[in-house]
Amino acid sequence: MLYFHGDAPGTQSILRRYNEDTVPVGLSQHAVLRTGYIAVIAVLVLSAFEAWRIQNNLSAQNLTIYHHYAEQDQALRVLRLNLWQAGNYVRDFLIFSTAEQATQLHAQLDDLKAEDDRALQSLDQSSARGAAIPKLRRSLGEFWNVASAVPESLVNTTNQAKFEFLQHEIVPRRGELYNALLDLAGADQQKLEEGERDFAETRRRGGFRLTTMLALGVLLSVVVARASLRHAQILESRAERHYHELQKLSARLLHVEEEGRRKLSRELHDEIGQALALLQIEISNALSIPQPPGARRPLERARELAEQTVQTIRNIALLLRPALLDDLGLVPALQFQLEDFLRRNPISCDFAEEGVADQLPDPARTCAYRVIQEALHNCEKHSAATKVRVLVRQLPDCLLAEVEDNGRGFACDSLGMPARNTGLGLLGIRERAAIAGGTLVIDSEPGRGTRVTLRIPLTEVPA
């Protein structure tokens, strides 16, 4: 396992900038936004409560005005009707005056007077109307005093006396009472108009308060929305800056990793491999010399062990970074990798290359090699494929690499990654492709195999 420290050139500065940017700042902005949201919600709640209160007050006021007007109108109708009936009763009595008629008229007038008293009580319960109610009571009392005396005083009088009594006593007081009722109706109408004006004024004031609160809520909402958008823009720009910094850090770490792999591979191949080769030569020389009985077999086992160790060192060096990739280019390194792949697996493999230059840029060469290596590793471990095809093609503007197998495949999500999280291999090669400026497309379906396509842009690279 390789361990890479952050002392590589440029890595410490990237980490320092990232740590500085990720320190929590602007906590007061969060507090201001929270306060703004609470204020907006509070204004909306108060506006809703104010609207409910205004609606209830207006409804109660309107209902009160209607009830008062209905009660007053009903009382006035009773008084007008009783006045009309009393006149009719007196007229009928004056036409046919008998003792029985006098008794009946007396009872009828008492009933009408009782109804008028109840109507006056209903009118007294309402608000004051100035002099309308006292005037009505005075006129009504005079009318009933005169009308109540009719049954006893006009039973045995002449028609001329009855007519004069009717014209001089009943008719003037009836007219005066009718005028008093008209004045009272006018006062009621005036009070109704005043109530309507009060109702309109109350509604106007309530509407003004509600409009003011809603305007305040809209203003607060606009301020909070602008602050939120600005804060979101700041966070977005900061996240984008962090993303670019992480991309740079990831690219730097990959570069450091590849450099470490290259150095370690060289050291294993050049130093340890040469030392083991010299050990093999020395053991072979020792075997060429006559040995005492029993000493030859241990030397042969030591030579075999040295040969196995050399092969293991070569495999480790190949796994870290093949020297062919730096010395001869991408195609020989891939050919050697595919030969090793065929030695380990019974999977049929087809390799094709078209116009790939020997001297490709190191980022493109390394990215293509690692992507194909990871794709072959996944095919070997997970796909259960029987055939795999590798194609590397250099186009005028890009390097194209494809690895396709006929294995079991897998389901992909909307980002083109496995729906089930099976590891970091595919995510790592996609990150490598992005750092190299290329694109990686993974096309797979259950039961239909997998195709990995890498496209890396190239500039001024001869074919």
Image (spheres, rainbow, N blue to C red):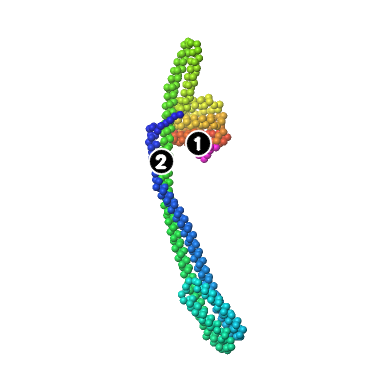
In this view, the mark in front (1 or 2): 2
Q: Which mark is residue 129?
A: none
Q: Residues within 10 Å of mark 2 (few under 14, many from 20)?
A: few
Q: Is residue 422 above or below residue 134?
A: above
In this orientation, does residue 175 appear? no
- How far from the left and from the top, in percent, is residue 406? 56, 32
Q: In terms of depth relative to the viewer, which is nearer, 271 or 143?
A: 143
Q: How many numbered marks appear? A: 2
Q: Amino acid at mark 2?
A: Thr
Q: Amino acid at mark 1?
A: Val
Q: Label 2, on which residue?
A: 22
Task: Identify the magenta region.
Answer: 411-421
The alpha-carbon separation of the residues under discs 1 and 2 comes to 32 Å
In this orientation, does residue 15 appear? yes
Q: Locate the N terminus by quadrant.
A: top left
Q: In terms of depth relative to the viewer, which is nearer, 440 or 160?
A: 160
Q: Label 1, on which residue?
A: 441
Q: Residues within 10 Å of mark 1 (few under 14, many from 20)?
A: some
Per the picture, the main secondary structure of the magenta-coloured stretch is loop
Q: Is residue 15 left or right of residue 165?
A: left
- How far from the left and from the top, in percent, is residue 26? 39, 45
Q: Earlier along the polypeptide chain: callout 1 or callout 2?
A: 2
Q: In terms of depth relative to the viewer, which is nearer, 237 or 364?
A: 237
Name the residue located 50 percent from the left edge and 72 percent from the top edge: 125
Name the residue located 48 percent from the left edge and 63 percent from the top edge: 57
- How far from the left and from the top, in percent, is residue 133? 49, 76
Q: Which element carries disc 2, helix, strand or loop?
A: helix
- How far from the left and from the top, in percent, is residue 144? 53, 81
Q: Which element carries disc 1, helix, strand or loop?
A: strand
